[in-house]
Amino acid sequence: MLNTNNPQPLIHYIVQPGGKLCGSLRVPGDKSISHRSIMLGSIAEGTTTVSGFLEGDDALATLQAFREMGVDIEGPEDGHVIIHGVGLRGLKNPNKPLNVGNAGTAMRLLAGLLAGQAFNTTLTGDRSLCKRPMNRVAKPLKEMGIRVDTTEGGRPPMTIHGGKPQAIHYQVPMASAQVKSCVLFAGLYADGQTSVTEPEPTRDHTERMLRGFGYEVTSVGNKTILSGDGKLQGMTIDIPADISSAAFFMVAACIAPDSRILLKHVGINPTRDGVIKILCLMGANIKLWNKRMVGDEPVADIEVVSSTLQGIEIPQELVPLAIDEFPVLFIAAACAKGTTILTGAKELRVKESDRIQVMADGLKSLGINAQATDDGMIIEGGTLLGGEVETHDDHRIAMSFTVAALRASSPIIVNNCSHVSTSFPGFVDLAKQAGIDIEQQIV
């Protein structure tokens, strides 16, 4: 039977307690870089060849959106994509709303690119995405002179009335790589210099990739600057494994006794490595091997061995560098000795779900003392019990509670896991291969 509010079948995970992780794994390609490879490859001149592309629902939604705007894209086939770029002003009116599914990154970044087009475009998504606020990108685009229409509360569908953006110097109120990238993408179409200043550094994949495409971008501290009306030249991109996906197995190996795994070819961009630094502060036994540069991105093989974790107060400067990994870091905190305190992470409340509240509720249902705060959480390490947890259609919540079963006293049933395919196709098979006793139940 199908869920009547969602065309996908309902998927629940039934995860048995205990187990250990061993062996060598390679998780799928980086989602952030996969999105950006399609976007910038499409508006570049010439051909862009991509390997390691994440064939998850979110990245595929971005690819389909650009096909609907007239871009010839071959693949994906085993992670290989060939994009025949149409240049900065070569996109065509799709003549219908672009549905990006659950991909918040796609919607927010596309809004910036669409601001400079000679047509109007409506962006929509699935039920979950249409609950998420888009005012964070609508506000700077309006300051750039672009009309943006949303529904009540600034939620999708969102219509971008394309035109000529005005260059601005934008101070981002909350550290967000998506807002930064949206403004920079709109700045590609503006006359003069556009800059974005952030309160904290966030992931810099957009800046690195723009430079790879031959576009001049300057970064000074937390300020990023570019000038409009340049050109992007097609390139070859090798996408590393996604550190956000690797994080589930990093935490799993830390908390499961007698575990040792090697995660291969993982991107360790310094604006994304907060999960490694936080786990190491908690006492994790993690080593990086074979460090190298792949294109413009640093990559390494990550070895993780079972560890006795300690609760910590997470340094605020690391929060933006691990924003997507906090759901599974909360599981690490639940298995640690003592108290873990997170502050300065209010952005977690506007992700695919309110990740602060949803994780706190789930941890409490499993016997952990977890107190949600306005901008973070206080977690007392303890004994995880079994039970049922709700994901609220959030892929990272689903995978995090799957990992929790390694230290649970009885099975954990994780409800509504259909969205895991947005970021991690093949998660269940790889989890089984690693040593997690998990079964899918399709309703």
Image (tube, rainbow, N blue to C red):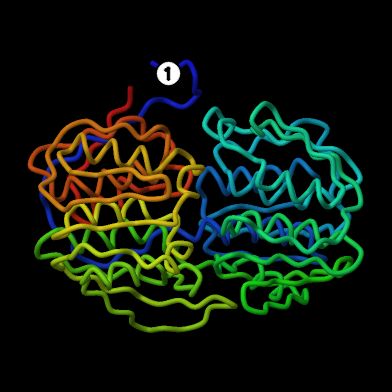
**Residue pictured at 37% horizontal, 68% vertical:** 315
Label 1: how many Cα within 10 Å (few below 14, some 14–19, many 20+): few
* Amino acid marked by disc 1: Leu
Secondary structure found at label 1:
loop
Nearest the camera: 119 or 74?
Answer: 119
Q: Quadrant of residue 77?
A: bottom right
Q: Is residue 23 above or below residue 355?
A: below
Give residue 198's position: percent from left, percent from top: 62, 65
Q: Is residue 98 left or right of residue 256?
A: right
Give residue 214's position: percent from left, percent from top: 76, 76
Nearest the camera: 140 or 285?
Answer: 140
In this figure, what is the number of numbered marks?
A: 1
Per the image, the residue denoted by label 1 is: 2
Q: Is residue 281 left or right of residue 301?
A: left
Give residue 155's position: percent from left, percent from top: 64, 32
**Residue pictured at 42% horizontal, 64% vertical:** 243
**Residue pictured at 82% horizontal, 48% vertical:** 115
Q: Quadrant of residue 279?
A: bottom left
Q: Is residue 273 left or right of residue 250?
A: right
Q: Is residue 216 above or below residue 379?
A: below
